[in-house]
Amino acid sequence: MAKVLVVGQGGREHVLAWKLMQSPQVEEVFCAPGNAGTAEDVTNVDISATDCERLLKFAKENEIDLTVVGPEASLVAGIVDIFKAEGLRIFGPSQAAAALEGSKSFCKDIMRRANVPTADYSVFTDPTDAVQYVQEREETTFVVKADGLAAGKGVFVCSEKADAIEAIHELMTKQSFGDAGKKIVIEERLEGQEVSVLALIDGRTIVTLEPAQDHKAAYDGDEGPNTGGMGAYTPAPFATPELVDLVIEKILIPTVHTMRKNGTEFKGVLYAGIMLTNQGPKVLEFNVRFGDPEAQPVLMRLKSDLYEVLNAAANGRLKDLPELEWDERSAVCVVMASEGYPGSISSGHSIRGLDDAAKLTPDTKVFHAGTAIDGDNVVNTGGRVLGVTALGTDLSQAKKKAYEAVKCIRWQGAWCRKDISDKARQAESEA
Ligand code: AMP
Ligand code: GLY
């Protein structure tokens, strides 16, 4: 029987730990550092997700068979290289390959070399040059991005030149995201529906997961600032089997090939954030790990044994794996957030009603993200607090069940988007 370590503390890590625990081959799952939800389902270990040396020591001492890494920060910090150097099995990309997410300019360069469709772009290290570029362009819409990691918040989608210039100052002059904004990428703004296509990659073989749609903007109707993701659902009607084939052919295969040629072979989850434009699918970004919150609804629908799947990927044996099995039903995940998110938040409030929500139906699961145990209470500690996820015969039923559970839960300042999965209906009416 295997022992597994999940690294991270968000909703994605909660679903990973929960799903891995269901494997008949798994004896114990640890989550470092975890949250109040993982403490209930598995065993938390009080080590930070980026403290690679202590995680390594823990994995060795506890004879961990497989380590699964959630957050990009740990991957960019080189956890995979450190574990592999000691002969430990770990699922994720090397530090060099994680640059696909850790540096937007690296990512853009790989896409250009791989001939992967993406928005036109320029890279700047000087704010004066960046402002001049914006002023001289004919178009008035831009997307300004911090080159480095910024927890999904370093992207500014701008409708006017003045907003783009403000974003440049926010990133480069005020340095609101520290070193991550020293270099920036300015892109053409694309229009269309977004889908997330995630694939498991062992260096050569590509196994796609069921596509999902995230909701990046903070408020209903896609208004407001960008967030890490306010909710997700699957299946995404925009992502037809033909589209997924096109994404594999035009995006995933050339990227994996170019990464290998570049000496940065990719192993792990390759997450393609895609915009369905009039000219076909274009890549908005690559992430090098499971999406959060996409992982919650997607893994809730996975019927295959996640341990077996990730173990095969870590062993470079994806080609021998039977086809993944999926629950035919739909899943919707609604993120409940703290007051103030995505800005500075109000934390430490007791969360009520978690037990009532859990009792509603067996097809509902409240995944924790920014929570901790404080005495007898569960309190909010982060911006995104819970991912309330439900399965239903179709999307509207899954949505109804998820929001019924949301209604049971309260804490001071709690809020969520009310329209998670409504974009799917737009797809149906356009079809
Ligand atoms: P990223 O972290 O690069 O995916 O950007 C976060 C979000 O910003 C995406 O999910 C999109 O909603 C939006 N976005 C990023 N790049 C573009 C673009 N070129 N055009 C329009 N929206 C974009
Ligand atoms: N949901 C977006 C992300 O995981 O980056």
Image (cartoon, grey):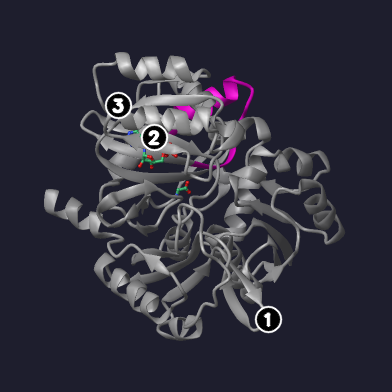
Instruction: Give the SS element for disc 1.
Output: loop
> Disc 2 or 1, which lies upstream in sequence?
2
Query: Which residue ends up furthest to the front in the rendered image?
Result: 174
Check disc 1 and give the amino acid type: Gly
Badge 2, how many Cα within 10 Å: few under 14, some, many 20+?
many
The answer to whether the residues at label 2 and label 1 have Cβ atoms under 8 Å apart is no
Please provide percent x and percent y for residue 135: 32, 17
Mark 2: C-beta under 8 Å from nearest atom of ligand 1: yes
In this orientation, which residue lies closer to the viewer: 15 or 164?
Answer: 164
Query: Gap between marks 3 and 1, in whole Å?
Result: 50 Å
Check disc 2 and give the amino acid type: Leu
| Residue that badge 3 annotates | 161
Instruction: Give the SS element for disc 3.
Output: helix
Quarter of the image where one finds residue 348: bottom right
Decide whether residue 259 is among the magenta residues: yes
Q: Is residue 343 above or below residue 36?
A: above
Mark in front: 2 vs 1:
1
Mark in front: 3 vs 1:
3
* Left or right of residue 235: residue 146: right
Please provide percent x and percent y for residue 415: 39, 67
- The quadrant of the image that shows the N terminus is bottom right
Q: Is residue 294 above or below residue 287?
A: below
Mark in front: 2 vs 3:
3
| Residue that badge 1 annotates | 375
Quarter of the image where one finds residue 16: bottom right
Badge 1, how many Cα within 10 Å: few under 14, some, many 20+?
few
- The residue stretch that appears in magenta: 252-270
Please provide percent x and percent y for residue 184: 49, 26
In this orientation, which residue lies closer to the viewer: 8 or 322?
Answer: 8
> Disc 3 or 1, which lies upstream in sequence?
3
Query: Gap between marks 2 and 1, in whole Å?
Result: 43 Å
Mark 3: C-beta under 8 Å from nearest atom of ligand 1: no
